[in-house]
Amino acid sequence: MLNIENLHCQVETQEGEEKPILKGLSLNVPAGEVHAIMGPNGSGKSTLSYVLTGRDGYEVTQGSMVFEGADLSELEPEERAAAGLYLSFQYPVEIPGVPTITFLKEALNAQRTARGEDEVTAPEFMKLIREKAKQLGVSMDMLKRPVNVGFSGGEKKRMEILQALVLEPKFMILDETDSGLDIDALKTVSEGVNALRAPERGMLVITHYQRLLDHITPDVVHIMANGKIVKSGGPELAKELEAEGYDKYLGEAA
Amino acid sequence: MTATLTHTPAEQALIDALEGATGWRAQLREATRREGLPTRRHELWKWSDLRRAANDVTAPGRITVTGLDTPITDGARIELCVAATAGASAADAELVIPAGAKVTLIERYSAEAGALANWHLGITLEAGARLDRVIIATDTGDSAFIASAEIVLAPEAHLHQRALDFGGRLSRIETHVTHPGEGAEVDLGGVYLLDQGRHADSTSVVHHTGPGGVTKQLVKGAAAAKGHGVFQGKFMVDRAAQQTDARMTHRAMMLDDRAEIDAKPELEIYADDVQCAHGNALGALDETALFYMRQRGIPAVRARALLIESFLAEPLDAIADETLREDLKAQLRTRLEALS
Ligand SMILES: Nc1ncnc2c1ncn2[C@@H]1O[C@H](COP(=O)(O)OP(=O)(O)OP(=O)(O)O)[C@@H](O)[C@H]1O
Ligand SMILES: [Mg+2]
């Protein structure tokens, strides 16, 4: 479903210099599978999530990324979203003045229009969002507030998953969605994610902690260091990391 | 002293257009005769060069004002359409809002390409009167359109003013308010949105002459490449105007590096027991928010429009009349979608 081959990516620093971050990353996530990526701070995990979703300033210099046969680098961010790519941001963004509910309806209908589907009507949308909000324990009051403005760290993460439940993407990238969540919230949010697991859907779960993977069991765990995947294995790899740390992989990445 | 000024064709056209005029129009004629059209050398025209904006004007034009026959009584809704043809022209009117009356005044400006239009209102608010003034300057694109008002309040009077300005070769909305305090309140607000080559100037002076006056001002703007926004706001507080509470804010968004926005918020205070503040902030579109919206599937143009709209709309939210408020917000939205 998602095929990344020998991907090299650089970002432009504030000083205007090109800084290579991804250095030959390869990764395949077939439909129906959940892959986890773990790796030390600064290894390039968020960079991967941004380059996949098309953020400005993240330039692919070599390699390819293909999603369901389409070359992602040729698509605008909104086209990638309409194709089904969804990123739960490590740091969700505040949008003052735009109520969450308006934002989500706008997003859903924009995606549907781009796919040649009919827009959902206001009553249909309200029904949908009420149901999903209930599923995630989010109040309608909160949905009337501007996107992420004044939300706590954990509330923002919960909101990211609520948005995913409404938009029903084909492929989700969760960038440290577990950080900032309390124990109960982690459970609710994981249930939300698990509800989206399906044979036609893929997921890439970026995390530092085994505790998320206790709830969302991955099919494959990858270790990323210095811009590359340095080891892949089953769920036991995450447990091993928890016990031993990254030390033995850092040498291999250099 | 003899006047030795050589008039530009536009100045001569304006002087000719005002031949035989009286009152404010005669003052405008004499000021033009004496000093010409204002340029950046004039203190109150620091960033707006009217002489230059009117440089293709060579003949007198016509300005028509409809709606002035509406009786000004409690509950009245006065809708003035001020329309200028090409060429130099000026018109003015006096309005008195009777004691205790609540009145809505809507002014719609339009001008043909090549107009140099001057429109002036003298407004008196008697004790306890309330005036909701809404200025819609969305159709003056290729002209120089100068609207000025001299508004005098009595105690307990309320002035609530909102303006929506899409700019022109030069669009200027100038408001002078005499604020006596003693229960009187002034709320001035405005929005400007400027596409390529458009210029809008919001200039205001609120003169607090008596104690306990309350004044609020919020102007928000956005300018695209080669758009030029100007905000000049001045609060004067006399020695007698103790306990004045006056707050001024101007916030603007540069939509492109080649936009220009100039702001001069000023306080001139002679009383010692007052609460006065001014704030001025210039920013750019939040690129991170833009990406977040696009990641959710909202096309770039629409995401941009939504972000700018949510930033600009705040002053318009305070328009009491719902139909009017929605009309202005819809105009803003349409304009945003078409922004280059
Ligand atoms: N715009 C930028 N300018 C300079 N350096 C950058 C820029 N963006 C990312 N980097 C650097 O690239 C490296 C990878 O960053 P990235 O955010 O992808 O790491 P990460 O693996 O997600 O880390 P964490 O676990 O802390 O979230 C870091 O060293 C970071 O400082
Ligand atoms: Mg990260």
Image (cartoon, coloured by chain):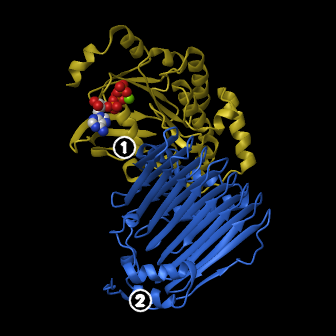
Chain colours: A yellow, B blue
The residue lying at 79 percent from left, 62 percent from top is B75
Q: Position of residue A170 (x, y in %)?
A: 54, 40
* Above or below, B99 relative to A64: below
Residue B111 visible somewhere in the drawing: no
Between B132 and A22, the one nearer to me in the picture: B132
Q: Quadrant of the N terminus of chain B?
A: bottom left
Mark 1 lies on a secondary structure that is strand
Left/right of residue B304 with respect to residue B182 in the rendered view:
left
Q: Chain of mark 2?
A: B
Q: Which residue in the protein does label 2 denote?
A: B12
The residue lying at 55 percent from left, 77 percent from top is B24
Between B281 and B177, the one nearer to me in the picture: B177
Tell if the residue under mark 1 belongs to the same chain as the one under mark 2.
no
Q: Quadrant of residue B245 in the image? A: top right
Which quadrant of the render holds ligand 2?
Answer: top left
Residue B227 visible somewhere in the drawing: yes
Left/right of residue B214 with respect to residue A8 in the rendered view:
right
Q: Position of residue A24 (x, y in %)?
A: 26, 36
Mark 2 lies on a secondary structure that is helix
Which label lies toward us, 1 or 2?
A: 2
Q: Which mark is residue B301?
A: none
Q: Which residue in the protein does label 1 denote?
A: A65
* Above or below, A242 relative to B229: above
- Identity of the amino acid at label 2? Gln
Q: Position of residue A114 (x, y in %)?
A: 55, 55
